[in-house]
Amino acid sequence: MRKKKAFYLVFAALLTAGSVLAGCSQNANKNTTNSGNGNAEGTSSFSYLMHDKFINWLHEDKWYPHVEEATGTTVEFVPGGSNDDEYYASVDQKIISRTFPDSGIVSVSQATVYGAQGAFADLAPYIDKFGPNIKSYIEKNPTYKTLITNEDGKIFGLVAEAPRFADFIFYRADHFNKAGITKVPQTIDELTEAMRQLKAYYGKDDKNYYPMVGREGYIRFQSAFNAAANYDDGVSKGVYANGKTGTDLYSEGYKKMVEWYKTLYDEGLIDPEWVAGSGTEESWESKMLTGQGSISYDYLTRPSWFLDNGGPENDPDYSIAILPYLKDLNGNPSVQTTETQYNTLRAMVVNKDSEDKAETIIKFLDYLYSDEGQTLVSWGVKGESYEESGGEKKYIVNFSEQEATPAGEPRWSFLNDRLTFVKPIDNDAFYSWNTDLVRKAAHELFTDQSLKTGVQVTYTADQSKQLADLSAKVNEAVTAGVTQFVTGKRSMSEWDAFLGEMEAAGYKNIVALQQEAYDAMYK
């Protein structure tokens, strides 16, 4: 029988902070923020705490006023901060001082800890009575039900569904053409040879040219080397993280991948600043735009961004193309592990002191789970932003033009990986809202055969604290250790010794914790 557990506690420190609410009475003075039932006859209202940028996004989205009109609800947005640290500190302060608005976005750990201390309303009875679409969604998605429901059957917060997608490998098609590369690489070896050809052509006159450039972590090809962490057959292998960024040091392919990166580094085929961690997003963009880089592996919208900013006005030859996912070491199409289906970093909660607003809030959210609401937030208004023919919807507004609208001005935008309100995801719409380049690649490459949704696992409070402590140490040690091999500061002959050091740091303890949590949730 599957065991129900609390949310994954991301910030273990809140376990002690939450105790300040232990003595709070459910009959304490009510939060007075926007406490009226509405601004006009027949209109309900509630206040909602969000990151500042989330509020700006909603003010710009043309579909959002239609949501308030359809639900007869006015939402008063309360800004909580411009970055995560500032925001979650603000949440703590507002909860402790009893000034939290009617509802808001909090970290999942805050939802768990403060909910148990009586700060947030149990949403289960309100969903049962006023949220038929939410209730139907929960019942059809047992993993979601397990995530949001504690051992007593209470729901202190709702999390959002995340779109199902992977990063793209994309390249300067004009560079490939000019360097004489006529065959699109399908394997790691073919990609390596293409980079050598690019280096010979562009590197002869520019010592700062490197075929592969990027931002953030440079280890991106785990799937091609069969080195991604996984739960194959229910067995925890590797440090899973959220699936997408996981890695399995003990797989045969991981060592081969490190050796491959070392070859790239030694031959000047990968940007050394990227490997060293000293490159910035801006420097990466500059290199791809000015011709000092040709290949990147990054977020699905990035190919369009580079195409829009690199040409044709700046360079009429500038061209970006997206590479099909490479075959793995066994010659099979590689499978990309996506992030988990649900965003377990943030949750939407209702203030216990504002429980008289729970009906209004749940009815508002329930509309977003309805067919009509899903069409509105995913496609907009028929005849204005989309048209429908033969049961197929198609946007009639241009992605690039709309997303280039100056900040603060209304636009049609359907970037539903942004968390504003919790709601389901229409993946077809998510793929379609982009340029022709990305739209075509997404529909071709994001298939059931090429994508493997990350396994959703939750942890007890004690497991979460152990995991947080171990992960901070192990992740840094793995990155630093691997980079030493890649840059030649450490010989590959010491690989087994390195694995022993990672074990001492707690690598296998993380794998064991993952297994315990997985077994509790799924076995």
Image: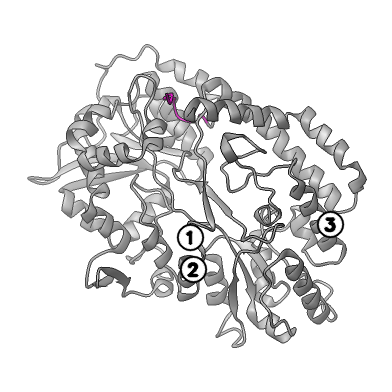
Tell me if mark 3 has few (under 14), some (14-19) or many (20+) residues whose alpha carbon lies within 10 angstroms of its own. many
Q: Residue 378's spot in the image, x, y percent? A: 32, 59
At x 30%, y 14%, the residue is 25
Task: Decide if residue 228 is on the left or right side of residue 456.
Answer: right
Instruction: Say if 94 sits above or below 190 in the image.
Output: above
Q: How is the image coloured?
A: one colour
**Residue 444, disc:** 2
Main SS of residues in magenta:
loop
Instruction: Say if 57 sits above or below 13 in the image.
Output: below
Q: CA distance from mark 3 to mark 1?
A: 32 Å
**Residue 447, disc:** 1
Magenta region: 1-9
At x 65%, y 64%, the residue is 326
Q: Amino acid at mark 2?
A: Glu
Q: Depth check: give the residue in front, 329 or 112.
A: 329
Residue pointed to by mark 3: 262
**Are the two marked residues, 3 and 2, in contact with CB atoms closer than 8 angstroms?**
no
Q: Residue 9's spot in the image, x, y percent? A: 51, 29
Q: Residue 224's spot in the image, x, y percent? A: 68, 57
Q: Quadrant of residue 327?
A: bottom right
Q: Quadrant of residue 346?
A: top left
Instruction: Say if 197 sits above or below 432 in the image.
Output: below
Q: Residue 127's spot in the image, x, y percent? A: 24, 33
Q: In the structure shown, which secondary structural element does the residue marked by tag 3 occupy?
A: helix
Q: In the structure shown, which secondary structural element does the residue marked by tag 1 occupy?
A: loop
Of the numbered discs 3 and 2, the one sitting upstream in the chain is 3
Q: In the structure shown, which secondary structural element does the residue marked by tag 2 occupy?
A: helix
Tell me if mark 1 has few (under 14), some (14-19) or many (20+) residues whose alpha carbon lies within 10 angstroms of its own. few
Q: Amino acid at mark 1?
A: Thr
